[in-house]
Image (cartoon, rainbow, N blue to C red):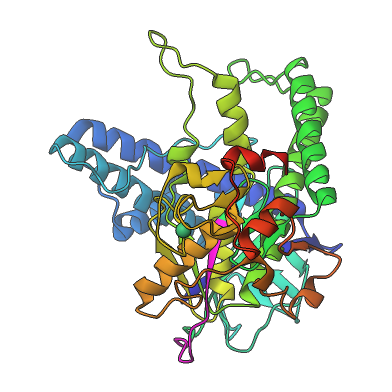
Amino acid sequence: MIRSHVFGVRFRKEFDHSMLSRQAGMDRYVHNRLLEIFRDEYRRCGTADTSLHRINTWYTDLRNETGPEWMRQSVSDMTRQILYDLGRHYGQYIETEHTKAAGMGPRVRWGEPHFKRRGDRISIPLKITHDNTHGDARFTGERTVRIAKMGEIRLSRPFPVPNYRPKSARLYQTSDGKWRIAISCEEPDPEPYAGEPVLVGVDRNIGNVATPDHIIVPPYKMVRRMRNAERTAGRAQRIASRRQKPDRTRRKPGSKRWARAQRRAARNRRRAADIRHTTSHKISRVIADTATHVAVENINTQNMTKSAKGTKEKPGRRVAQKSGLNRSITEQCWGLLVTLLAYKLAGGVIRVPAAYTSQRCPACGFTDALNRDCREFLCLLCWNHSHADRNAARNIEDTGARMLGRPCRRGSIPSPLHECPAIPAGGAHVKGRLDVEGSGMVSPQKRQASTGGVRPSGTVMLYHDV
Ligand SMILES: [Zn+2]
């Protein structure tokens, strides 16, 4: 299994930054030269030779004979990697075009590669080997890496984990100007889980994540901090729009005040993203501590967050509301949560169909839209009653269990609220960092209805006063 690990980077004093930008400049130069050749060839003959052999001979010729003098100073291994990547990308682009021309839908659509411009973000590929004998980057210590011709960098945390075999790395700059290094390693495949699976259903909502036992809410402080960062980013972006922007056609750089506003926007966007990431990590940790397998709804966030804008002839309605909803859906990071769960769990993630999970009564199977009323779930047939999100999580869990070929852990027996399991012992681990809601949020009337077995005489409307 190949996995990538990202580290923060600190440059040692002796690090040659000029070499770094020179390398980036050279990479850009050869990248654009080769792209020009590919484009020309493709326009003329309908195909282009993107083989490694061709790229290698072209580059060697350029470097030794026709290319400019300063090119000989670059680290050629790094440059070659960039050209290989370009070759592969262009090959995929041609294949996409051919499939489209044949009237078939390509599986993945590859656009034509762009020319790199000065000022684009720098990303430099590095070769790094586990035995440290060759390659243009080498480990010199637990958290130091020496890069050929440039100098030493320090990683934000120690790297060498005995079983990891580093293969390649990429030194790059994020949008807010910070440097990172991503080291991809070959790791031993995880052992398939052999024990008895413990399955937990997970319902992802806006503002919380629910399991049949509890509701996990990110602390308000964290949410507020993220919103603040986003607001600051938006404000800085508006300020930047009123400053002197760079003019590419007249090759004029933007003003310093524009750059400052731009940096501020990028920094705050990154901050917000970091908070979302941390939150997802913490939520997935709570769940992974109590389960070996997780069942989630198979939802397509991309379709759910399509804009309501419509077309010019047929404009959509309530566009602003929909865009607000879209924002709150995307900031929940539903996909990220599943990714994180997948590697934290001993078992794995099961995706179940999403239909009717919030409307179905797990006790008697009665399914109706009226069963659900805001945050409350009340079955109109058997008066089984619980928190709506936990109910959905339980339905997801039951479906997942059936898909695993296991009996439902909670069976089809109604689970009255007063018998809900308490917060697990893992809660201590989480203390002070996440609020784990138990079976609160129940009105006295409802508790009576579900425990006393007395059917309320009114309708569901009764429960609006929660
Ligand atoms: Zn029911």
Q: Is residue 91 left or right of residue 198?
A: left
Q: Where does the magenta region start and end?
A: 191-203
Q: State the image coordinates of residue 336 (x, y, percent, origin top left).
A: 57, 57
Name the residue: 46% across, 83% down: 189
Q: Is residue 176 left or right of residue 135?
A: right
Q: Quadrant of residue 385?
A: bottom right
Q: Is residue 336 visible?
A: no
Vertical order, 421 against 8 (above or below): below
Q: State the image coordinates of residue 251 (x, y, percent, origin top left).
A: 64, 20
Please, what is the dominant secondary structure of the magenta stretch?
loop
Name the residue: 79% across, 27% down: 236
Q: State the image coordinates of residue 329 (x, y, percent, origin top left).
A: 59, 41
Residue at the left extreme?
Answer: 102
Is 200 covered by the magenta stretch?
A: yes
Residue at the top extreme?
Answer: 313
Q: Nearer the viewer, residue 234 or 80?
A: 234
Is 84 covered by the magenta stretch?
A: no
Q: Quadrant of residue 323?
A: top right
Q: Is residue 462 left or right of residue 314?
A: right
Q: Is residue 447 visible?
A: yes
Vertical order, 336 against 135 (above or below): above
